[in-house]
Image: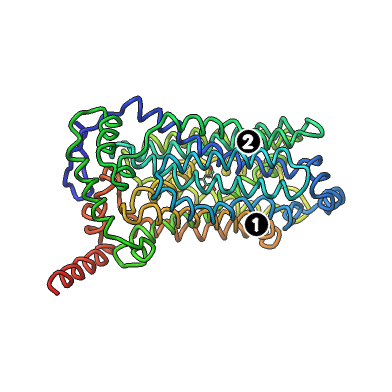
Amino acid sequence: MAVVISSNGNSKAFDAKMTVYVFICVIIAAVGGLIFGYDIGISGGVTAMDDFLKEFFPSVYERKKHAHENNYCKYDNQFLQLFTSSLYLAALVASFFASATCSKLGRRPTMQLASIFFLIGVGLAAGAVNIYMLIFGRILLGFGVGFGNQAVPLFLSEIAPARLRGGLNIVFQLMVTIGILIANIVNYFTSSIHPYGWRLALGGAGIPALILLFGSLLICETPTSLIERNKTKEGKETLKKIRGVEDVDEEYESIVHACDFARQVKDPYTKLMKPASRPPFVIGMLLQFFQQLTGINAIMFYAPVLFQTVGFGNDAALLSAVITGTINVLSTFVGIFLVDKTGRRFLLLQSSVHMLVCQLVIGIILAKDLDVTGTLGRPQALVVVIFVCVYVMGFAWSWGPLGWLIPSETFPVETRTEGFALAVSCNMFFTFVIAQAFLSMLCGMKSGIFFFFSGWIVVMGLFALFFVPETKGVAIDDMRDSVWKLHWYWKRFMLEEDEHDVEKRTD
Ligand code: BGC
């Protein structure tokens, strides 16, 4: 029997085994993360390929050939950045549609829709003969990301037994990191295949999209989604199947209770604006915002230039991608292992200090030793590279996965898909902003950019310290009683709601 200890020390006992079936479901669903990671990783490489630039951005290609060498500004080009970041804008819009399909049709069909968007998007982008096909393909890929990133983390949090929820949910982030690593390796090899290497690179995403499409036929719908849509019998059967035990009555009742309550809520978005929704809403949005303000995507982008400086020569791009990418993948396992043991808060706090030190060291060395057109001395560059790797480690076991996990496990059923959609779109918006602005910021702020991110890391660390409660081991539909009502700050919003309910009943 799995005993779930909630943060107030109350215990809720739901019988649950870790079944092979749940394991298969987790792996298949998390392939959605693989496609997301592949898309993150592939665009930088493709937009650096001359064949690609000649075909779609000839003026950028000409400019690139005559680019004035400047350490901080050589890659600055708004048009190219827009090509990369347009995917995130499409994903942002799509996550609201995905929230509706998640509620009305279920998590599984939403994943299937994601794989269809991915497949058509990949076909159009890889087969593009003009810029319109390319951009349209990219928008459809963005739709795939929006649908996948909405459905997969929710699916994982809902099918996992509470005591393993953190680790199983982080399989999504693990797949994201594997996707980034594969994309970087693919970029390297396809860049020397002329003139169609970029088509192969973009087309590669078709493989995981097919796996997701066919794999999703094997997985189940989540019990919560079934019960929410009045398929109670099927919901109970599914619960038995995924928990691997016959007696699931207690957990079933708790889901039914949560869904009954959810049905009374007519407009989830209005409900999200109410005080009682404030804790998951504020935490979900801010964790995603902070995740991007750690500067992870900026660091990942800057790594090849640094590795080159250290003297890896022409292979710098591949090596930096393989080294930082492998560290990213391996460190995510640390997160999977620790998240349900040490808890979420420990990882967030530890890594805030850890990432802050790394960003400061990198910033100080660059400020002192790298002038605008000169190069960094090798010893300093080596130190920078080491700190980049250590930084990636810290992100990979904390703000990376927890930015997805915590918002997917803290909203109650009545606002879960809508609240999570807002969190996903917040992530997409700030990924877009960073992708769009980073190169110009680097050009304008120079090494100051690392101090900029350091400042944000201090803010997010303090936020985690005071406002993010521990959710380890708490049943997903029990957050209100076991977490928010006991938190020094958030409990005031719960009390307000209780008073309001009492007033309504006495009226
Ligand atoms: C973030 C991405 C980031 C990736 C790095 C994800 O959780 O959302 O923006 O590139 O982690 O591993």
Q: Is residue 379 left or right of residue 22?
A: right
State whether residue 41 is above or below residue 16: below
Which quadrant is home to the C terminus? bottom left
Q: Residue at x 52, y 39 (%)?
A: 176
Kindly identify the amino acid type of the residue bearing the numbered disc 2: Ala
Q: Residue 126's x, y, as percent?
A: 70, 38
Q: Residue 205's x, y, as percent?
A: 61, 35
Q: Residues within 10 Å of mark 2 (few under 14, many from 20)?
A: many
- Disc number placed over residue 151 in the picture, else none: none
Q: Residue 347's x, y, as percent?
A: 39, 45
On the image, which quarter does residue 341 sit in? top left
Could you say whether the residue bearing mark 1 is in a helix, strand or loop?
Answer: helix
State whether residue 106 is above or below residue 337: below
Q: Are marks 2 and 1 in contact (CB under 8 Å)?
A: no
Q: Nearer the viewer, residue 226 or 442?
A: 226
Q: Nearer the viewer, residue 269 or 168?
A: 269
- Disc number placed over residue 436 in the picture, else none: 1
Which quadrant is home to the N terminus? top left
Residue occupied by mark 2: 183
Separation (CA) of disc 2 from disc 1:
20 Å
- Which of marks 1 and 2 precedes in the sequence? 2
Kindly identify the amino acid type of the residue bearing the numbered disc 1: Gln
Q: Residue 196's x, y, as percent?
A: 78, 34
Q: Is residue 466 visible?
A: no
